[in-house]
Image (cartoon, rainbow, N blue to C red):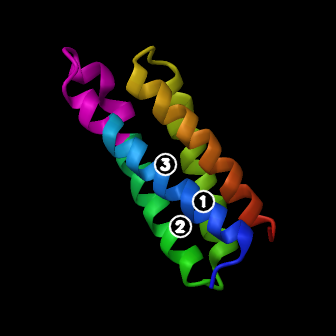
Amino acid sequence: MAGRSAQACIEACDACAAACNRCAAACLRESDVAAMARSIALDIDCAAACQFTAAAAARSSELLGAISALCAEVCDACSAECEKHRLDHCQACAAACRRCAEACRAMSVGG
């Protein structure tokens, strides 16, 4: 069974992956998809990183510290990009990414 901080990490990662997937799908429906290309790419990367991290946390991987540190870095990049866009789905994604990065940082330092 995952510890308390691991469970918080799993929940934040799951929520972030869902927000990133919603954001990517919504970005693809925007009128200027080309302007959203970096956001879409980072949404996809972030969702994948979050899913990987949640799985690693659930199984108490010995590499969880490194995996969660990488996830926090990916979340930071995605958040920074999504914050540039004043669209509701991008702002929601950026907020989920910030929460996830915080939870992952707690794991990466042995939380």
Q: Residue at x 67, y 70 (%)?
A: 6
User: Is 38 situated left or right of 102 in this image?
Assistant: left
| Dominant secondary structure (helix, strand or loop) of the stretch shown in magenta | helix
* Number of dots carrying numbers: 3
Asked if the residue under mark 1 is in contact with the one under mark 2, i.e. CB atoms within 8 Å, the reply is: yes
Q: Quadrant of residue 2?
A: bottom right
User: Is 80 situated left or right of 43 in this image?
Assistant: right
Disc assigned to residue 16: 3
The location of residue 55, given as percent across then percent down, is 48, 74
Q: Secondary structure at mark 1?
A: helix
Q: Is residue 51 magenta?
A: no
Q: Residue at x 45, y 14 (%)?
A: 86
Q: Nearer the viewer, mark 1 or mark 3?
A: 3
User: How many residues crowd mark 1 within 10 Å: few (<14), some (14–19), many (20+)?
Assistant: some
Nearest to N terminus: mark 2 or mark 1: 2
Q: Secondary structure at mark 3?
A: helix
Q: Residue at x 49, y 25 (%)?
A: 91
Q: Nearer the viewer, mark 2 or mark 1?
A: 2
The location of residue 15, given as percent across then percent down, is 48, 51
- The three-letter amino acid code for the residue at tag 2 is Thr
Report the residue marked by disc 1: 70
Measure the C-alpha gap from mark 2 to mark 1.
Answer: 9 Å
Asked if the residue under mark 3 is in contact with the one under mark 1, i.e. CB atoms within 8 Å, the reply is: no
Nearest to N terminus: mark 2 or mark 3: 3
Residue 31 sits above or below residue 91 on the image: above
Nearest to N terminus: mark 1 or mark 3: 3
Report the residue marked by disc 2: 53
The stretch in magenta equals 24-41
Image quarter of the N terminus = bottom right
28 or 5, which lies in front? 5
- The three-letter amino acid code for the residue at tag 3 is Cys
